[in-house]
Image (tube, rainbow, N blue to C red):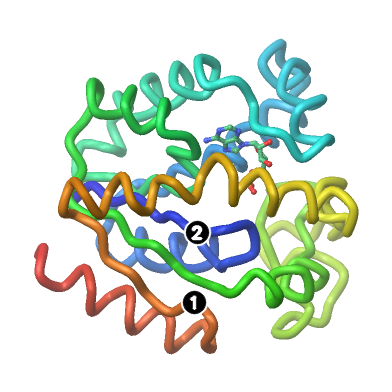
Amino acid sequence: MKLIFLGPPGAGKGTQAEKISELYGIAHISTGDMLRSQMREGTPLGAEAKGYIDRGELVPDELIVAMVAERIKEEDCANGFLLDGFPRTVSQAEALNGISDIDMVIDIAVPAERLMERIGGRRMCSGCGAGYHTSSYHKDTCEKCGASLYIRDDDRPETVKHRITVYERQTKPLIDYYREKGNLSRVNGDNTPDRVFDDVAAAIKGLV
Ligand code: AMP
């Protein structure tokens, strides 16, 4: 099973992707997590990506496409994968067409005015990169590895506003792109995480 999760920053893609990938035994590929891990490790790709990420801009297509093309060749993708945060431009979607077929694209829709407050509650583990939200998690250390939690630089309000603009301009056109291709499914992301999960799982059910 090969899936794409679309949706604006703060829609809950990462939370849902983690649960769905576990349920179906498919690899969860988050390009944002991959880039942050490159930054933590201090690799050349991490250094190049940092400026774009800190400004809330997209990392150039060719870097991201090369990273994803390599990732989906890995063994844990043999049973399928879930792309979270990729593609983010029509040009990335076209490059993906040449790399892999996709069974379903799920757009997790959340109104723009809800995104700022959702992102305001996000916390991330400085050790393993796990994500949390203050609405459901009240500690300041990670329950998986014990490291301290922090607020992502690009989750600060000024950068978030810009990321939402970038989403509207560069990523939202993918909704029509995949609708025309005929494999788009839309889920209302403005619900509790459990409700969104049920709706996403129901959308996927036809595939398994
Ligand atoms: P995310 O964790 O998905 O919100 O991504 C964080 C940041 O990583 C984004 O604001 C971009 O700067 C960069 N990024 C992640 N995925 C992509 C992508 N597919 N194309 C370009 N930049 C990306």
Q: Quadrant of residue 102?
A: top left
The answer to whether the residue bearing label 1 lies less than 8 angstroms from the nearest atom of ligand 1 is: no
Q: Position of residue 183 (x, y in %)?
A: 19, 54
Dividing the picture into quadrants, the one containing residue 41 is top right
Give amino acid for label 1: Gly
Q: Residue at x 27, y 48 (%)?
A: 178
Q: Name the spot of residue 52 as percent of width and height, x first.
A: 76, 28
> Which residue carries the number 2 mark?
7
Counting residues from the start of the chain, the first of labels 2 and 1 encountered is: 2
Q: Secondary structure at mark 1?
A: loop
Residue type (three-letter) at the residue carrying disc 2: Gly
* Quadrant location, the C terminus: bottom left
Image position of 183 with respect to 43: above or below: below
Relative to the observer, which residue lies in front, 122 or 112?
112
> How many C-alpha atoms fall within 10 Å of the one at disc 1: few (<14), some, or many (≥20)?
many
| Image disc number at residue 142 | none
- Residue at point 28%, 75% (across, down): 201
Q: Which residue is located at x 51 percent, y 61 percent?
A: 13
User: Which of the labelled discs sits on residue 189, or is there none?
Assistant: 1
Within 8 Å of ligand 1, the CB of disc 2?
no
Asked if residue 43 is positioned above or below residue 111 in the image, the reply reads above
Q: Are marks 2 and 1 in contact (CB under 8 Å)?
A: yes
Residue 157 as seen in the image, left or right of residue 31: right
* Cα separation between marks 2 and 1: 9 Å
Residue 160: x percent and y percent? 79, 54
